[in-house]
Image (spheres, rainbow, N blue to C red):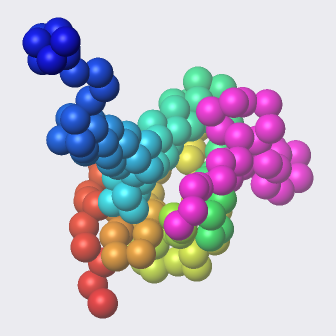
Amino acid sequence: MSRARARAAPAGFTLVEVLVVIVVIGIAAGFAVALAAPDARDLSAREARRFAGALEYAAQRAQWRSETLGVSAEQRVIRYWRRDPGSGRWQLVVDDDVLRAHALPDPLDAMALAFAGRAVASNVIVPLRASGRNEPFAFALAAPGWRTLVAVDPLSRVSIAGPSADPP
């Protein structure tokens, strides 16, 4: 009977095998969390690309429809505006999915930096003319420790600088 027990395969797993499986699952979970939750730098870069694309679209739309559009940023919200030709007042664009107000994810903030070579209030409405010839302007997307600049030149070409470390 002792020979029969010696030949039988042991049942279950050893402690070492269980620990190896737990370590592998922990490493996989760590990678999943890192990929699912981007850091502030990645978030800033992604939102800057999105903002740049929307600005290019808005500049082209202004030309196609012969209308004056505008863009503003106030803390965590980027808004697009249309100038009413009759009254000259700015009206929020609500009929275009690309140009609807966009809330930035936490912890990003957006602000206007410059228009026509001069510093401006952070929430100013920057115009995009139907002619396609615009004054250069720049916006910043900021997260703790990071800053990304989105700039538009007089021919409505958009460039992105950063994200770069925000000086203390």
In the rendered view of the protein, which quadrant contains the N terminus? Answer: top left
State whether residue 30 is above or below residue 63.
Answer: below
Front position in the image: 95 or 3: 3
Is 166 on the left or on the right of 48, as rendered?
left
Which residue: 43% across, 69% down? 143
Q: Where is residue 90 in the image (x, y as percent from the top left)?
A: 79, 54
Give the residues in magenta. 78-107
Is 69 on the left or on the right of 55, as rendered?
right
State whether residue 154 is above or below residue 12.
Answer: below
State whether residue 90 is above or below residue 158.
Answer: below
Q: Is residue 33 magenta?
A: no
State whether residue 4 is above or below residue 162.
Answer: above
Front position in the image: 145 or 72: 145
Specify whether residue 136 is in view: no
Q: Does the magenta stretch include residue 92?
A: yes
Specify whether residue 29 is in view: yes
Q: In which quarter of the image is residue 146?
A: bottom left
Q: Residue furthest bottom?
A: 168
User: How many marks are shown on the rendered structure?
Assistant: 0
Q: Where is residue 162 in the image (x, y as percent from the top left)?
A: 26, 59
